Image (tube, helix red, strand yellow):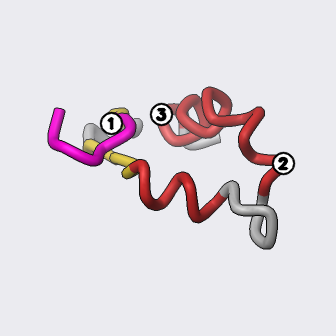
């Protein structure tokens, strides 16, 4: 996996979608969406299924 990438998943169209550590930290910052920290696996499943 490329440095800095937190994970890569394939969407339902066969595209590789990745999230970097830097972007994840931005998402879960207290002023943004800290509640998302408990839903990282759900986010990956949503990207994969498109639902």
Mark 3 sits on what residue?
A: 48
- Res 19 label: none
Magenta-highlighted residues: 1-8
Could you classify mark 2 by the number of other residues whose Cα lies within 10 Å: few (under 14), some (14-19), or many (20 or more)? few
| Percent of width and height locating residue 7 | 37, 35
Compared with residue 24, is residue 42 higher up or lower down, i.e. above or below?
above
Nearer the observer: mark 3 or 2; the answer is: 2
**Residue 47 falls left or right of residue 2:** right
Question: Which quadrant does the C terminus fall into?
Answer: top right
- Residue on which the image places disc 2: 35
Please state the horizontal and vertical placement of residue 40, each as a whole percent of the image: 63, 35
**Do the numbered discs 3 and 1 sit on residues whose CB atoms are within 8 Å?**
no
Q: Residues within 10 Å of mark 1 (few under 14, many from 20)?
A: some
The furthest residue to the left: 2
To which residue does mark 1 refer? 8
Name the outermost residue toward the front: 30
Find numbered disc 1 in the image and state the secondary structure of the residue it sits on: strand
> Which mark's residue is nearer the viewer, 3 or 1?
1
Who is closer to the viewer here, 42 or 35? 35
Name the residue located 38 percent from the left edge and 39 percent from the top edge.
6
- The quadrant of the picture occupied by the N terminus is top left
The nearer-to-camera label among 2 and 1 is 2
Label 3, residues with CA under 10 Å away: few <14, some 14-19, many ≥20:
some
- Find the distance from the CA under tag 3 to the CA under tag 2: 21 Å
């Amino acid at each position: 996996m490329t440095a800095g990438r937190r994970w890569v998943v394939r969407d339902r169209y066969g595209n590789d979608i990745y999230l970097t550590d830097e972007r994840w930290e931005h998402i879960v910052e207290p002023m943004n969406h800290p509640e998302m920290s408990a839903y990282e696996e759900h986010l990956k499943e949503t990207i994969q299924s498109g639902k």
